[in-house]
Image: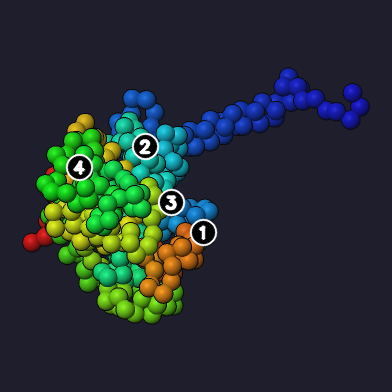
Amino acid sequence: MPGLQVLHPSHDNSFMILLRNFLILSIFSLSWSCSVQSEGDPPITIKVVVVAMFEIGEVEGDRPGEFQYWVERLPLDETLEFPQGYSPLRLNREKGILGVTTGIGTQFSTATIMGLGMDPRFDLSEAYWLIAGIAGGDPEDTSPADAVWTDWAIDGDIGHEIDPREAPEDWPTGYIPFRNKSPYQLPLPVEDQHWGVRYKLNPDLLRWAYSLTKDIELTSDDGSENLRKKFKDFAGAQHPSRVQIGGHIAAATYWHGALLNDWANGWVDYWTEGQSNYFTSAMEETGSLQSLTRLDKAGKADLNRVLSLRGVTNYTRPIDSVSAYESLKGETVGHYSAYIPTMENVYRTGSVVVDAILENWEKYKDSIPSAE
């Protein structure tokens, strides 16, 4: 056929060389791209799992979500497919650090962490888990861009609920502890292992992490300072950004307002029997901790090696002169008042703990650290 040249191997030995080289390169490329474990290979020993909840846009090189600084700076330079989870995993194979993004909400975090824990590619039995993300804060206790280590994580969804307009007039809320009959009724209901209402994180590990990070200099910006000025009547909002310890509420419902902020304080106080105070609110911790509880029972994770760190990007209630609705619609994910410095402070604080674990791995793989 005019204009068409057909290469025939018997006529051109260079074709065979070209074909051979192409096949070799193709096989090499396939082997390189399939960085997951082959069947029969030993699992990768993971020392630290960094758990983020969301990312904005790309995982590198643009406006950061919760995962980006960890990926760029640790770095987590290897991408692994994770079809049973929310998005691909990131790995630093040499350091033994694995990064995962769960997706927003307790249903996503539960599924993703369970999927990771059951993944045969990894040995997570001695791994430390750092849940690291942003949160709303109580202005009575937190300042913009604070980094708050969680002592107790309390579920804000499990319970009974009556619309407050239909509740008895003397009730402070229409929300009732599961299997009780009135708000904050004592004694506490007898907990069933399947509820997952409250989780007390390992206090020794928590105090160790806090002792390492309590004097870190945190950053701020104009957005943070403007938020402080708006909340000038709230003592907690006035101090410079710092590292703290406090209670956390996790609820799939993105609640907001002064009345619900009061409920959050009462709910944390109730379920911790006065041992903690509400500081931060987000949407995932109790889902992640429920999966880790089950994985601990299966010998695939150690619940005593879990830390939660949340940075305060905004507040869970407005100032008195602004309605809850106006306050809620005024800020969106990725553009909260203290968003960028909070992302920086969470990484700055959490990475100190990650580095300490890695530097002392021969000790900490067998013995969980505690404050002296």
What residue do we see at 35% from left, 69% from top? Answer: 145
Q: Are marks 1 and 3 in contact (CB under 8 Å)?
A: no
Label 3 – label 2 distance at C-alpha? 15 Å
Q: Which residue is mark 3?
A: 54
Is residue 42 positioned above or below 68 on the image?
Answer: above
Q: Residue pushed farthest right?
A: 2
What residue do we see at 36% from left, 76% from top? Answer: 231
Dot placed on the residue nearer the N-terminal end, 3 or 2: 3
Dot placed on the residue nearer the N-terminal end, 3 or 4: 3
Instruction: Please rate how many residues cluster around mark 4, counting C-alpha atoms within 10 Å: few if below 14, some from 14 to 19, many from 20.
Output: some
| SS at badge 1 | loop
Is residue 277 positioned above or below 224 on the image?
Answer: above
Q: Residue pushed farthest left?
A: 372
Percent position (x, y) of residue 68? 44, 56
Residue type, mark 3 in image:
Phe
Label 4 – label 2 distance at C-alpha? 29 Å
Instruction: Please rate how many residues cluster around mark 1, counting C-alpha atoms within 10 Å: few if below 14, some from 14 to 19, many from 20.
Output: few
For the residue pair 251 and 224, the one nearer the viewer reads as: 251
Dot placed on the residue nearer the N-terminal end, 4 or 1: 1
Label 4 – label 1 distance at C-alpha? 50 Å
Q: Which mark is residue 233?
A: none
Q: Which residue is mark 2?
A: 111
Dot placed on the residue nearer the N-terminal end, 1 or 2: 1
Q: Which residue is mark 4?
A: 180
Q: Which residue is mark 1?
A: 61
Residue type, mark 1 in image:
Gly
Instruction: Please rate how many residues cluster around mark 3, counting C-alpha atoms within 10 Å: few if below 14, some from 14 to 19, many from 20.
Output: many
